Image (spheres, grey):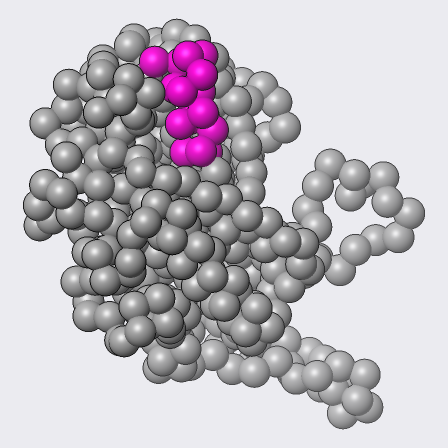
Amino acid sequence: MGSNDVVITGTGLFTPPYAISNAELAASLTIAVTRWNVEHADEIERGELVARTLPDAEFIEKASGIKSRYVMEKSGVLDPDRLRPHLPTRNEDEPSLQVEMALPAVHEALAQAGRRPDEVDCVIVGCSNIQRAYPAVAIELQHALGAGGWGYDMNVACSSATFSMQAGVDALKNGSANCVVVVHPEITSGHNNFALRDHHFIFGDACTAVVLERADDAVAAEQWKVLGLKLSTAFSNAIRNDFGFLNPSEDDPRDPFELVFRQQGQRVFKDVVPMVVDHINTQLAAVDLPPEQVERFWLHQANLKMNQLIAKQVLGRLPDEREAPVILDTYANTSSAGCIIAFHLHRGDLASGDIGVLCSFGAGYSIGSLVIQKL
């Protein structure tokens, strides 16, 4: 291998302590929706408002492939009067919630890589929502680890994991870092809209971590060489969240539903599938690999039908469960962490020389993918 080759040497996963089934989620929202429709019956009758649709646990699985999800706090999500997690306010001397989630994932990834925390000299936190403006969560995590070097936060929504890996690869290739940890602490329950049938089931919480090193320095028993990395973006309002620091200064009050996740689901499906298929095919062609040589696709875990269609169009046939593993059933959509969870849990059976594609896609639109080979 060349002296500038980069390898993945470890991954880690933190799974939150609480699970919520589709049935639990649907039962909670049924109470809230029924109450809302009664309270606004007059406006609905006059045509000023549209009655909200009752949720359905069977619909959730049929529409998405999701059966359950993990969250950092369960009681508030299932409280029909609240429909959002209860997260106690922490003082400045306490670790942030995202750092608390990140530490177990990072330590697992470092153990796989055979590295100590003090050998890390670059920490990048990439996720769909950062819990504060500054100081950077990555710098707090760097401090908590006892790592050296530098760190920063970045946000490219559901593609934050692959985009942060690109940044890590670049840092290793240009010599500004020797051991990079990219971390994806997704508390999606904090930005999800649990009040609407079309959105309440989509997300779950989780945190993943990945260790990247130059191949010449790596000591891990298992290593994955990065053969190629490709990023692309194209602006779209089809997935949007307008929460931001300017909200208190805006002249007109916003609809609260503008300050949480929202999407035009059918439009996203129609737009994104061909974009991702073209992205993957273009990247495979650039590294002279036909799709049939790819043993595994670790795709962003957004929707089962979406993943199946992407893999089918790349391969020219329906994939089996082994070729395009899914973790949606138990983790739901964990934003940027999803494709890394799939990689973390579904790579142990692959042999030396096997090739896989790790791909994310989401708001922006943003798409990122890595072609990797097990050494």
Q: Residue at x 39, y 19 (%)?
A: 172
Q: Is residue 212 above or below residue 157?
A: above
Quarter holding residue 291: bottom left
Q: What residue lies at 64% left-to-right and 64% top-to-bottom?
A: 238
Q: Position of residue 316 (x, y in %)?
A: 31, 73
Badge count: 0
Image side of residue 247 versus residue 59, left or right: right
Look at the image and tell me in which quarter the N terminus lies: top left
Residue closer to the observer: 144 or 227:
227
Q: Residue drawn 47% across and 79% down?
A: 55
Residue 130: give x, y in percent of width and height. 55, 35
Can residue 346 be seen here? yes
**Residue 96, image x, y percentages:** 46, 27
Residue 49 lies within the magenta run: no
Q: Is residue 316 above or below residue 123?
A: below
- The image quadrant where one finds the C terminus is top left
Residue at 81% x, 83% y is 48
Question: Closer to the camera, 80 or 146?
Answer: 146
Task: State the image quarter where residue 144 is shown.
Answer: top left
Does residue 143 appear anywhere in the picture? no
Q: Nearer the viewer, residue 50 or 185?
A: 185
Residue 362 lies, with reference to residue 117, above or below; the image says: below
Q: Which residues are magenta?
A: 164-178
Compared across the picture, whether 87 is left or right of 316 comes to right
> Is residue 359 rendered to the left or right of residue 297?
right
- Extreme-front residue of the structure: 288
